[in-house]
Image (tube, rainbow, N blue to C red):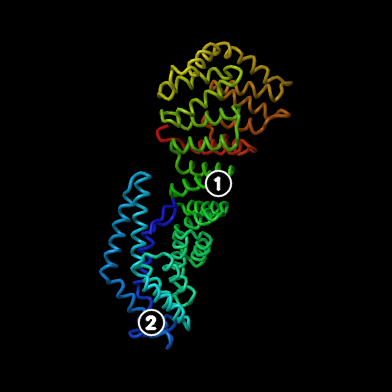
Amino acid sequence: MIRTSFLTRPAYALALGLATVAGAGLIANPAMAEEKKDKKKKDEKQAKLAPSKAFTPVYIATRDTIDKAGKRPDVVAAKANVTTMESAYRAAQGRSAREAAKAAYDKSVSDLGNLLVAEKAVVADAFTKVQIEDDRLFAGQFALDLGNIALDKGLQRQGLDAMLASGKLPAANVPKYYYFVGGLAYDLKDYAGAATALQSAIANGYTDASAKTLLAEAQYNGGQRAEGLATLKALVQETKAAGQPVPAEWLDRGVQMSYSAKLAAESMEWATLRLDSYPGEFNWISAAQIVREKANYGSNDAIDVSRLLDRAGALKSNTQSAQREYIEYLQSAVGKAGVLFPGEVVKVVNQGLAVKALDATDPFVRDALAEAQRRVAPDKATLPGLEKDARAANATARTAMIAADTFLSYDMNEKAADLYAIALAKPGVDAAAANLRLGIALLAQGKSAEAQAAFAKVDGTRAPLAKLWAVLAAGKVVNGA
């Protein structure tokens, strides 16, 4: 059994679990079963399981058939071949090699099953002879045992379903059996059946997190994408509430699921959740790119995405992703009608060249730098006038924002923060933009709590970006940044 879905319990582990169930001695041979007596607690006495009179000869014959099948040399050899093929599949590298190895593995399982056609017929006949629920439990055990020998997931599931339906299983084992049914149903691509079984496992007290991750996969692959993401999110929240680290693969899968499903809000949320727990360069850039794309930012907002990556320390390498982000940064800072923020362009180009993320011979980089260097001095000369106009009693929100944005571009953060505060007091202000950049300016001054308060006020399309800045304000930077 091989399952390749990202979060699912490895099929070989499930097979081992089923083997343990089948060999656990939960069902006694009717010829040997004896009722256990507990002199201390009568309610702990295990009820004796016994087949009906009509089913007894079926039981004996079927049990004998299965036992002999498991010892047959051809079956033993075929099972060994399956093990060999499975190992080859797991070791295969490259798509074509894995596809070939998977085909060989599937054929080995099919060959094994073809050796046990007669035995499967015997088990199927046993189900037709069931008279009472004890009989159903025994028939289910037969199907499970033969399914383990044949590596037949359908037969294994049939056996477990029958054992659960009998109502004769010890209560402590019911959650585990539902979990196994869920795993088998998932392997068989019966996602609705898998979800139902896994929900039953959880409702009956199965506590291993794998039940919820597999439930999330079953719901998602069964078309219930929002439900699958909700299940996974709830597990993440439970884990955090318990003070335990959230496995990276859960968060990775949440990002993958939401992005593949083209769920914009959920994609941004999951990217932020992952970043909060694992703030590495890749996750910072990935989160920024998802938010920029899903929120459909223009250059006026996209520059704050680039500033975020710079402040987080995600632009200190020359990885392909970092290279793309430097170009994004320059495009936003340059603007469409000339260099918008010359001081910032010079800083970004020099930084990009230093880490070899930008190429000095690239015409766009070369021209942007030359134009920015030409404009820095005259641009800085306008700063006093911009500030004076912004602080005037009759200044508009737009006047104050232009001045604040210019000071921010030169990392003159204290003045920028003052001017954003002035803008926020004016009618007609874009409060979301002003609060976002106020938070940026405050954070640059080390005022994390005040920055967080400003980010919390950002709404609308900028809210997802403000949440990323809030992650940064909480100190989640790339290692060494």
**Residue in the foreground of this view, choosing between 380 and 304:** 304
- Position of residue 470 relative to residue 381, above or below, is below
Locate residue 88, reporting x and y percent: 30, 52
Report if residue 39 is visible in the image. no
Which mark is in front, 1 or 2?
2
Q: Residues within 10 Å of mark 1 (few under 14, many from 20)?
A: some
The one nearer the camera, 304 or 32, is: 32
Residue located at (38% from left, 82% from top): 59
- Residue 391 position, x and y percent, is 67, 20
Mark 1 touching mark 2, by CB under 8 A?
Answer: no
Q: At which x and y percent is residue 162?
A: 46, 73
- Residue 59 numbered tag: 2
Q: Residue at x 71, y 28 (%)?
A: 426
Quarter holding the C terminus is: top left
Q: Residue at x 34, y 46 (%)?
A: 97
Residue that numbered label 1 is attached to: 261
Q: Residues within 10 Å of mark 2 (few under 14, many from 20)?
A: many
Which image quarter holds the N terminus? Answer: bottom left
- Secondary structure beneath dot 1 equals loop
Total numbered circles: 2
Residue 307: in sight, yes or no?
Answer: yes
Q: Nearer the viewer, residue 461 or 162?
A: 162
Q: Residue at x 60, y 32 (%)?
A: 297
Residue farthest toward the bottom in the current orientation of the protein = 53
